[in-house]
Amino acid sequence: MRLTVREAAVHLGVDEPTARRWVAQRGLPVHHVQERMYINPIELWEWAVEQGIAVSRRLLEEERGTPDDVPSLSDLLHAGGIFRDVVGSNKAEVLRAFVDRLPLPPEQDRDFLFSVLDAREAMGSTGIGDGIAIPHVRNAIVLRVDQPFVTLGLLERPIDFGAVDGKPVHAIFMVVSPTVPAHLKVLSRLAFALRDDDLRAMLARRATSAEILERIAFVEATRTTGSHRAVRP
């Protein structure tokens, strides 16, 4: 599925000239096909999360196509794990240490995954602000896993990620999914949860895993349908 700039503008709740201006000024990713611009729905969603821009949930429904239920975010974190004291003196070292701790099947090539994530950071930081980063590639991280999971890494010390607000990153999340629809749905839940001030404060003070999971479960219980806004300090 691919969107025209006008269709993307509808999902973003703006007019087409604004969307075109965001292409030129804010890096909204586009692809050129026979002199026309198109936008990948996954890239649109991830860009909106990074930019803190409201995006219609209808984008997820249209991209999903068929039902693809996933567990709650708290269950996904139970599956993926919360790791403390992720070490590294720079962004690359932190990503390497984080990838090494992901609960991936033995056959997965962790070196390749790290190289892809490292290359993505060279294109632009995945630090979304307030000390949080969501490392990813421009397309969904879809690996040979049976079930999606989310892994949280709390860094031993904050690291400069070149984040949008200039703040060093102290917490990184990774979404791993078996399918693109699952990836989109999990990313939506994570973006919603990270709007919560108390959760962000817990991440900053390195709260216990039980506290973080309990807070996420509470935030999810208050979740409503419709548009929502991603992290913005």
Image: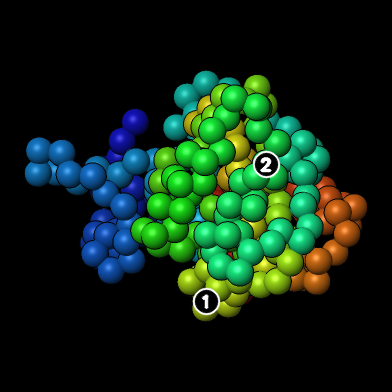
Label 2 vs 1, first from the N-terminus: 2
Mark 2 and mark 1 residues within 8 Å of each other at the beta carbon: no
Which amino acid type is marked by label 2?
Leu
Q: Is residue 34 left or right of residue 57?
A: left
For the residue carrying disc 2, how many other residues have a C-alpha within 10 Å: few (<14), some (14-19), or many (20+)? many
Q: CA distance from mark 2 to mark 1?
A: 27 Å
Helix, strand or loop under label 1: loop
**x then y, percent, for residue 153:** 71, 55
Q: Residue at x 45, y 32 (%)?
A: 63
Q: Residue at x 64, y 57 (%)?
A: 172
The answer to whether 76 is drawn above or below residue 119 in the figure is: above
Which amino acid type is marked by label 1?
Asp
Q: Nearer the viewer, residue 223 or 33?
A: 33
Q: Nearer the viewer, residue 119 or 132?
A: 119
Helix, strand or loop under label 2: loop
Q: Which residue lies under the disc numbered 1?
A: 165
**x then y, percent, for residue 79:** 77, 36
User: From where the camera sits, is residue 181 visible?
Assistant: no
**x then y, percent, for residue 196:** 72, 63
Q: Nearer the viewer, residue 136 or 49?
A: 136
